[in-house]
Amino acid sequence: MYLIINKKSDASNEIKVTALVTYAKLELKELIHLKNLYYYQDSMLSEFRANIVRTGSEENRNYVVLDNTAFYPTGGGQPHDTGWINDIEIIDVEKVGEEIRHYTLADVTSLKGEVHGKLNWTRRFDHMQQHAGQHILTAAFVELFDFATVSFHLGTELATIDLNTADVTAEQLAAVESRANEIILENRPIETKWVDKEGLAEYNLRKEVTVDEDIRLVIIPEYDYNGCGGTHPTSTGQVGLIKILATEKMKQQIRIHFVCGQRVLQQLAMRKQVLSEVARQLSVPEENAADALRNFAQTAKANDKALGEAQDALLVFEARELAKDTIAASVFSNRSIQQLQKLARFITQENPDAIALLVAENEEKLQFVASRGANITHSMKDISSAILPLINGKGGGNDALIQGGGEKVLTAGQLLDEMKKIYV
């Protein structure tokens, strides 16, 4: 649209300008009406030509507004498309008011007139497979068990739906997955139709729609009728395959993790690689890997228990030697705080008249434990309050046992000497 304005300024000209600008805005709004958008006219369109309406910037990104587009903006649980306008990479697409903004990090000031748009088709078709698969899977849960979907999320690796049920069995999941894949194998058409509020009465919708006009239905004939603004392939066969991978309890709902199409092959390849590596490490055929891993875990658990018992026996032996003194003090290297606590308890159990003062030097920090025997009335908190400021440390505990740690501004021996001063 061209706007010609007489240089002479008067009231009539101002009225004409206002009217033309208003008309231009209405024309743009009508031009990019939902029904006319390329991604709704033909979801399989991967390249297109359009005209630049305007360019702009927002925070650290620039954007382009076209008079039409095949780029799908984020919405309805489906992520945005990416791709290119001429040779400029589009990294995000969002609907802002009446505009669809194509965001880029590149300079857009040179874009004028007609441009060529090209989608990242691998990304778009993947999104269409997952979204159509969600419709099919959701309808199967309703058809077989009357479990409604309350939310949908399309992630980069997995897709999820949340069901309004507190429990779902393995048998139910298998039945739903089988039914969903039957619908895919039948290669039913996936149709779209625009209706108004009154026209909805003709269709058995899976759930109520939230808008009163420009209602877009996605239809799998004699199976699923649903209001949806996303993009989908033209037939169920293009979804390829649906596989349910996992379930997760979410309060009073169940989250279903699933994949469709190419993602099934990606998940299969990843899991095959993991299984092969596990089988190789265990030196067993893949079909025996689960049993071998179970046996390995049981053996490892038994070994951990035996090792723990052996370590405790050594700590008891060490405690007996230290407990010969009423101030059982010692410095260690690379002892965990848990080991120090256990040793301190063994010492005071062995000698109820002893106080255990233990310090360990671990990597870039000092750690300590102080514990008293049953016959000692002094509070161990006196120690922590005295030495924590010396090492810029933090600690906790009670009158009988305290522990803490801090910076290595002192040596382990110097810290132990400071602890001794309180009772010696």
Image (cartoon, rainbow, N blue to C red):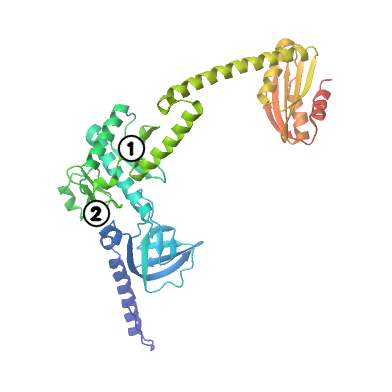
- Residue at figure coordinates x 76%, y 17% from the top left: 355
Left or right position of 185 against 271: left
Residue 222 lies, in percent from the top left, at 17, 43
* Residue corresponding to mark 2: 215
Left or right position of 256 against 320: left
Q: Secondary structure at mark 1?
A: strand
Q: Residue furthest left?
A: 202
Q: Quadrant of the N terminus?
A: bottom left
- Residue at figure coordinates x 80%, y 34% from the top left: 410
* Residue corresponding to mark 1: 243
> What's the amino acid at mark 2?
Ile
Mark 1 or mark 2, which has the lower sequence index?
Answer: 2
Q: Quadrant of the C terminus?
A: top right
Marks 1,2: beta carbons within 8 A? no
Residue 129 lies, in percent from the top left, at 31, 47
- Residue at figure coordinates x 18%, y 50% from the top left: 200
